[in-house]
Image (cartoon, rainbow, N blue to C red):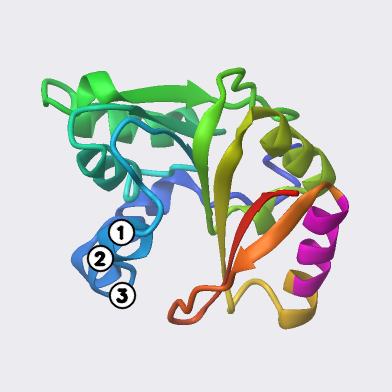
Amino acid sequence: MKNIEKHKVCPVEIAGGLDNSIRRFLQNPEKILKPYIRKGMTVLDMGCGPGFFTIEIAKMLDGSGKVIAADLQDGMLDIVRRKIKGTDLEPRIELHKCQSETIGVNEKVNFILAFYMVHEVPDQDKLFQEFKSILNPNGKILIVEPNFHVSKKSFKTMLERVESKGFEIIERPKSFLNRTVVLRMK
């Protein structure tokens, strides 16, 4: 999560392209997340961007639990803030600004969604160590990386890295044009 300028992070200026009907058709949040989200959970949407998944997760929690929408960029968090202001989702979504070197979430979570963001993090070892420190013992992590940014070899290397950090692969869901894995702690 180090140095936004040196390491490519999806810019706020293209946030509209991250939340539209075409993406919703190709990457339906409810369909992708339904097997993992339950009422009462605390969910971390890591690299939440404009809230494409955040808002759907909050709806899926059905009035209980909460979503921590975490992002490096104030602009992305501002977009989410505007979307939820005055709605019944606002109390269930906690906006969290990450620092360049750390996520900075101290609360335990049941589920972490890392959609299209792991490849943007220069120090993945540190990221996975931090995930491990905030994930509940029975919690899961869903990592989805785009084929067009992350090669098969890079994804394999990332998986070796997470396994060395004490996680195990429990599922490899199919996802159109993506590399996907579900992890839990060993």
* CB within 8 Å, label 2 to label 3: yes
**Circle 2 crowding by C-alpha within 10 Å: few under 14, some 14–19, many from 20:** some
Quarter containing the N terminus? top right
**Circle 3 crowding by C-alpha within 10 Å: few under 14, some 14–19, many from 20:** few
Residue highlighted by disc 3: 26
Q: Is residue 32 above or below residue 166?
A: below
Whether residue 46 is visible, yes or no, is no
| Left or right relative to 161: residue 109 | left
Q: Is residue 21 above or below residue 168?
A: below
The magenta-colored residue range is 156-164
Mark 2–mark 3 Cα distance, whole angstroms, equals 6 Å
| Left or right relative to 61: residue 184 | right
Residue lying at 52% horizontally and 31% vertically, measured from the top left: 109
Where residue 43 sits in the image (x, y, percent)? 44, 36
Residue highlighted by disc 1: 29
Q: Is residue 55 above or below residue 146?
A: above
